[in-house]
Image: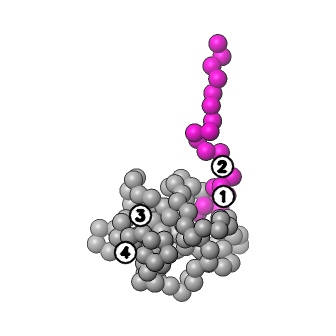
Amino acid sequence: MLLPSSNMKVFLRLGVTDMRKSINGLSILVEDFLEQNPFSGNLFVFCNRKKDILKILYWERNGFCLWQKRLEKHRFTWPSDGSDTQLITQKELMWLLDGLDFSQVHPHESLTYLSAS
């Protein structure tokens, strides 16, 4: 997947989303449940009940783009947090799309190195 810009944010719509929804239905979810502007250029990620389909909605210059990935054998590691929305990094999105559990990765800022002196 090509990322539209380096400064965009990635929002996960936690819980289950009906994958029959297309651009119009998902953009309404972005406004109503995520309380975000669907025209912002940010990525909005949705997952189905079986956790084998992800849809990503974003606005690019003159229209909406809807990207979908369906796994044939495995399941996505979808967060089970009780909130409606989770903000993740673009790198975490790439890990999610690769089937990795991005919540188990050590944050970069938590690593400290000691000098050998």
The reply to whether callout 3 and callout 2 are in contact (CB within 8 Å) is no
Please, is residue 53 above or below residue 22 in the view? Answer: above
* Earlier sequence position, callout 2 versus callout 4: 4
Where residue 59 appears, x then y in whole percent? 36, 70
The reply to whether callout 4 and callout 3 are in contact (CB within 8 Å) is no
* Earlier sequence position, callout 2 versus callout 1: 1
In three-dimensional space, the C-alpha distance between marks 2 and 4, rounded to whole angstroms, equals 31 Å
Q: Amino acid at mark 1?
A: Leu
Where residue 85 appears, x then y in whole percent? 55, 67
Residue hosting label 2: 105
Residue at 63%, 36% in the rendered image: 111
Where residue 41 appears, x then y in whole percent? 37, 65
Residue hosting label 4: 64
Q: Amino acid at mark 4?
A: Phe
- Residue 60, by quadrant, is bottom left
Most extreme residue toward the left is 62
In three-dimensional space, the C-alpha distance between marks 1 and 4, rounded to whole angstroms, equals 27 Å
State left or right for residue 65 relative to residue 108: left
* Earlier sequence position, callout 4 versus callout 3: 3
Q: Amino acid at mark 3?
A: Asn
Q: In the structure shown, which secondary structural element does the residue marked by tag 2 occupy?
A: loop
Residue hosting label 1: 100
In three-dimensional space, the C-alpha distance between marks 3 and 2, rounded to whole angstroms, equals 23 Å
Q: Amino acid at mark 2?
A: Val
- Residue 53, by quadrant, is bottom right
Span of residues in magenta: 96-117
Foreground mark, 3 or 1, reads 3
